Amino acid sequence: MWSLDLPYTAGGTLTAEFVQQAVVPCGGFDAYVDADNLSGTVMARPPKNGDRFTPFGMNGTRLLSDYLTDRKVPRFERDMPILCDENGIVFVAGHTIDERMRVTAHTNHILHYHYEED
């Protein structure tokens, strides 16, 4: 089981709600995750040096900083909320989810996160 703690908003608002199905495609400010794959407390926080995750659709882990560099995200735009559980990054607001959070045909509970910039 898991709980939700969303105090960090970094220039915007992060909301969460359970939905019946994922909307595909969705923009980078929306994420649909398999809620059954979440562990412990889910919290929003700023990016940290050394953050690693497996971007959606990829194999192997990447440094978050390398992922953002590859996508040519300027340094001044890198203070987006990072949603994490006890196993690591769940959602990089404005960009992507971690591969382990992918919604599949076997998903029973879908959680929709939405980040809206101020």
Image (cartoon, grey):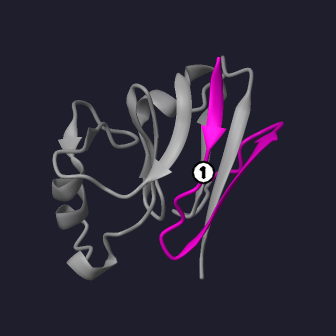
x, y percent for residue 48: 25, 52
The stretch in magenta equals: 1-24
* Residue 49 horizontal/vertical position (percent): 17, 52
Identify the secondary structure beneath mark 1.
loop
The verdict on residue 23 being magenta is yes
Q: Is residue 4 left or right of residue 76?
A: right
Task: Please give the name of the residue rendered at 26% of the width and 31% of the height, measured from the top-left corner.
Answer: 59
Image-based side of 3 in relation to 47, left or right: right
Quadrant (top left, top right, bottom left, bottom right) of the C terminus? bottom right
Position of residue 12 relative to residue 94, above or below, is: below
113 vs 2, nearest the viewer: 2
Q: Is residue 12 above or below residue 27?
A: below
Within the image, what quadrant is residue 20 found in? Answer: top right
Q: Is residue 97 magenta?
A: no
Residue assigned mark 1: 6
Which is more toward the observer, 23 or 112? 112
Which amino acid does the dot numbered 1 rest on?
Leu
* Residue at (66% x, 22% y) in the render: 105
Q: Nearer the viewer, residue 88 or 30?
A: 88
Residue 87, percent across and down? 39, 25
The N terminus sits in image quarter:
top right
Residue at 53% from the left image edge and 22% from the top image edge: 39
